[in-house]
Image: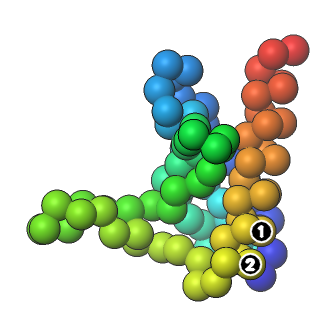
């Protein structure tokens, strides 16, 4: 699996949610609405989710293992940092 594109849309700075991201996998599959969140221990990603009938949020799409999640998070946060730097210039 190769992430062939990462698109970052920054959101309001006064919110814990810093950006919404779309990724393209192998130039053929897109996952929208991955969120970049500012947590107590720094930035992390939250996969797209939907509120269920019991009021809990459940991921719609997500990595199966922690290695894949870490790879996605590293790529997305790198793209977020680059977008933030480009905005400052």
Which one is in front, 65 or 79?
65
In which quarter of the view is residue 3 placed?
A: bottom right
Q: Locate residue 48, reporting x and y percent.
A: 45, 61
| Mark 2 closeness class: few <14, some 14–19, many ≥20 residues within 10 Å | few
Percent from the top left, x then y, of residue 49?
Answer: 38, 62
Q: Residues within 10 Å of mark 1 (few under 14, many from 20)?
A: few
Residue under label 1, please give it. Answer: 71
Q: Quadrant of the C terminus?
A: top right
Above or below residue 13? Residue 6 is below
The tag on residue 67 is 2
Asked whether the residues under the numbered discs 2 and 1 touch, taking CB atoms below 8 Å apart as contact, a structural biologist would say: yes
Left or right: residue 52 compared with residue 23: left
Q: Residue at x 50, y 36 (%)?
A: 17
Residue 62 badge: none
65 horizontally vs 4: left or right: left
Residue 18 spot, x, y in % from top left: 57, 34
């Amino acid at each position: 699996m190769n992430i062939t594109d990462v698109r970052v849309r920054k959101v309001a700075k006064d919110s814990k949610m810093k950006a919404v991201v779309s990724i393209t996998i192998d130039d053929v599959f897109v996952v929208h609405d991955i969120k970049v969140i500012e947590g107590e221990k720094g930035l992390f990603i939250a996969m797209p989710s939907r509120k269920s009938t019991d009021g809990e949020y459940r991921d719609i799409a997500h990595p199966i293992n922690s290695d894949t999640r870490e790879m996605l998070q590293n790529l997305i946060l790198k793209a977020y940092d680059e977008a933030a730097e480009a905005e400052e210039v």
